[in-house]
Amino acid sequence: MSHTTYNLLWAEAQTVLDEATKIDVEQQSAKPTKDRDYARRIVGTLYLQYIRAVNMLDQCYDQIAQPQKRMLIRKLLDASIGRMLELKHELVNIDLSEYSYFDDVMVERQILPQEAEIRVPTYYRREREKEIKERRQTIDRIMRELGFYEDDATGIIMTEMKATRLIQTHERARQGRLRAQFMKEIRSLKDKIKAEPKEEELEEGARKAALKIQKIWRGYITRRKIRKRVVEEMLLIGMLPGAYTSVAERTRAEEVKEDRRRLQEVRQAEYESALVTIRDEIKKHRGPAMMEEMGDEVRAWFMGYKDQTGKFPDLPTEEAGGSALIFSRQGQAESERSKSTAPSSKESKRGGKGKKSVKEKEEVKKRPEDEEDLGFKMSGSAFLADLMVAGADYEEKWKNLDESKNPAQNYYDDMIRKDKTAEVEAELRKIVDEQLRAELEALQAALDRDRARKGKKAKKAAKKKGRRGGKKGKKKKEKDLTPDRTTESLFEELVTNGIIKKYPEVSITSFVGERSYANHELRVKGHDPPPSLGDIRQVILEYCIMPLGSPQVHKNSPIVRSVLIAGPQGSGKRLLINAICTETGATLFDLSPANIVGKYPGKSGLVMLLHLVSKVSRLLQPSVIYIDTAEKTFMKKVPKTDKTDPKRLKKDLAKLIKGIGPEDQVIVIGTTRLPWECDQKLLQQAYHKMILIPRPDYASLSLLWTEQLFQYAGLSRQFNTSSLARLADGYTVGSILAAIKDVLTCKRVLQLRMHQLTHAEIINVLCKREPVYKEEEEEFLTWFTKTPIGRRKQKALEMEAEKIKELESAQP
């Protein structure tokens, strides 16, 4: 696509953002509402609009080559992602569920399901591709040195048993060929011995055989033509997937995208070079004049202030803004207030602060009750102001810009000059301020001598010194147990001990599942439908991938420190862990009980392990700290057969999670298939979000069967996957994938064109695997209702039922 196409896409995204921010600002000042459905519709509409904007802006940022545009688009993209995540947390509080459904809103706004699907921004990985590749290569090198990887140069190393079986197979095949040849010779001898039939009998038999063959052949080719015609018609109208998909256009599109990305790098290098060149040019040619002008301006203010008050003013400090603060209204007001404040004002300020803090504490105590009384009100946003500023910047600079003279998408010189002039001015002002402070001291000293008031200067100096002495309390810094170690050596140690692991790269889209499109309607009718696999994928994106991939988003969005993923065996928990790491380019730390057994023994060893994980995860962020069988950490009683010491992290895990701050792109993710077999209070304290993967529904199973089976070209496009989706109800995705792998071996795939696949083949293999029984499913649901979000929802449902009963009893 051309530059114009992406400019139009940016304009469309900006229109969506303008509409969303307008509603957002109105809702910030709106009165609280008790109507939860109304609140859900408003917040849901904004949420969907921001998702659409994020998806469009991601395409623009990935493909637009002009560097100054990309800077603004990146600000818009990060702010849109952050606001989307804020609204997600609002929806959780409104629906009292981790899953929100917008069937009605999407119909009303005419939004397609594909538009409401969050796509991972391309820059999460692309801008760190080199770093990610080097890290994976380092892991490979360390593992190879430790002997975990075998070099290919040594050839295939075979055990004695495998070699014996190979020899036996070939020998039996040789003997079989010899016997077949021997039997063939015997049959030919028998045929020669038989009496030859008469010529008339041979001709009649040949004629009958020919007619029979012709009849069968003509019927076969006619039926084949009809079937072919029906399939072609179904393919034409899109009712059947094609056996072969041409990738030529897709490959060409990817090549064009890569060309544009290379152009981006060229334009970015030119832009960065221009920043330095233009800055030096401005400083060299205009710097002296700017300094002289600023000095004269401030000196004139000095003398004017002295003429009015009879004394020289104090020049604001560099931290406060220096002389630039003087010429703003706010600076003048602040200066006047500071001059008019009496020396005893410190005590009054302290008293005021104390009163305010008490008042704030009282408000915080009363807030939960007020919220129940007043209803829902939109919380403040850390990103809305950035969105509005960036939107105004777009309106001012880019919306009506004529780019007909810049088809190559080079940088705009005038924009750089404007920004660098302000930057040089700020830099030179600091130098001018230092000179003026020296002049001001000399003038004040001369004035003091003239008025014989030498004590005044000493008092002022003492006063200033007292102000500088005040410092804010800082957070206690954790002691570094490895101050003399490099990041590379720490990384190598953790890889050697198997704590940092290499993971297979898979996309989040590999977690196949359909979204729910009617669950809101079911909720309105009083049901509580389980989420589908597509909803699980969306929640993983919202809690794990989207915040973790960007430092700006993670720092300001609602923080999610830890997530617990629960589900039966084969439901895709480990696939989700790998997808999270892949999409964000994260480093994977494995603290599973089975993985750390025997490593870093003793109390001091455990302290060192947690220190290394905490330190290296921040140095190599984004990072994912993975804990398999998470319930074992908080088991009340460990079985005697379990030798992994699973409760080793029980006391320190909560501390590790609590230490993760907004500036740390680190998340702890646990997985479990028996979440009820532990202390629930400790489990809920450690994991802030809990996600239950349910058994796949019909829509997800149908999509899974279709995607997995129709990737084989030899399979008939009329193969009925709907019946398989019904028959496989209760089986996990892992069981289904394993069954397909067992059935469609290499030999069976080659036979597909002559011998079509049948449902019985798959079902016979699938039946040998364990499904998710009703008892196990009920245990998962019972456990989930006892989680914090489950209890909140249960309480809300009970209160709603009581209100309905009261209304019914009040009616005559």
Image: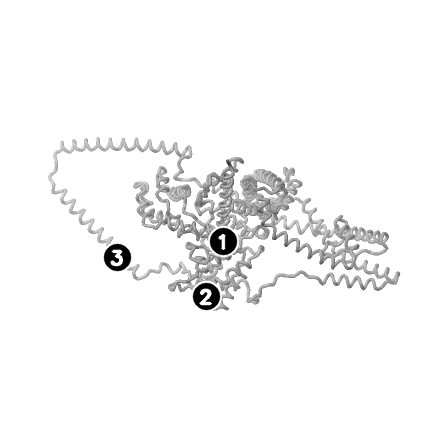
Front label number (1 vs 2): 1
Q: Give percent across and percent down for residue 768.
A: 32, 50
Mark 3–mark 1 Cα distance, whole angstroms, equals 53 Å
Please give the residue where the numbered disc 1 appears in the rendered image: 563
Query: Closer to the camera, 490 or 325?
Result: 325
Of the 4 image quadrants, the one containing the N terminus is top right
Instruction: Give the CA separation, mark 3 to mark 2.
Output: 45 Å
Residue type, mark 2 in image: Lys
Tag 3's secondary structure?
helix
Mark 1 to mark 2 CA distance (whole Å): 25 Å
Q: Are marks 1 and 2 in contact (CB under 8 Å)?
A: no
* Residue that mark 2 sits on: 599
Give x and y (percent) for residue 420.
Answer: 69, 49
277 displayed left or right of 796: right
Q: Earlier in the sequence, mark 3 or mark 1?
A: 3
Question: Which image quadrant for residue 310?
Answer: bottom right
Q: Which residue is mark 3?
A: 168
Which label was assigned to residue 642? Answer: none
Q: Residues within 10 Å of mark 2 (few under 14, many from 20)?
A: few
Please give left or right for residue 454 compared with residue 395 in the image.
Answer: right
Bin the neighbour count of mark 1 within 10 Å (Cα to Cα): few under 14, some 14-19, many 20 and up.
many
78 or 347: which is nearer to us? 347
Q: Mark 1 or mark 2, which has the lower sequence index?
A: 1
In this rendering, the label closer to the viewer, 3 or 2: 2
Amino acid type at circle 3 is: Gln
Where is residue 788 shown, x and y percent of the image? 50, 52
The reply to whether residue 77 is in sight is no
- Residue 743 position within the rendered picture, expressed as x and y whole percent measured from the top left: 33, 47
- Viewer-nearest of labels 3 and 1? 1
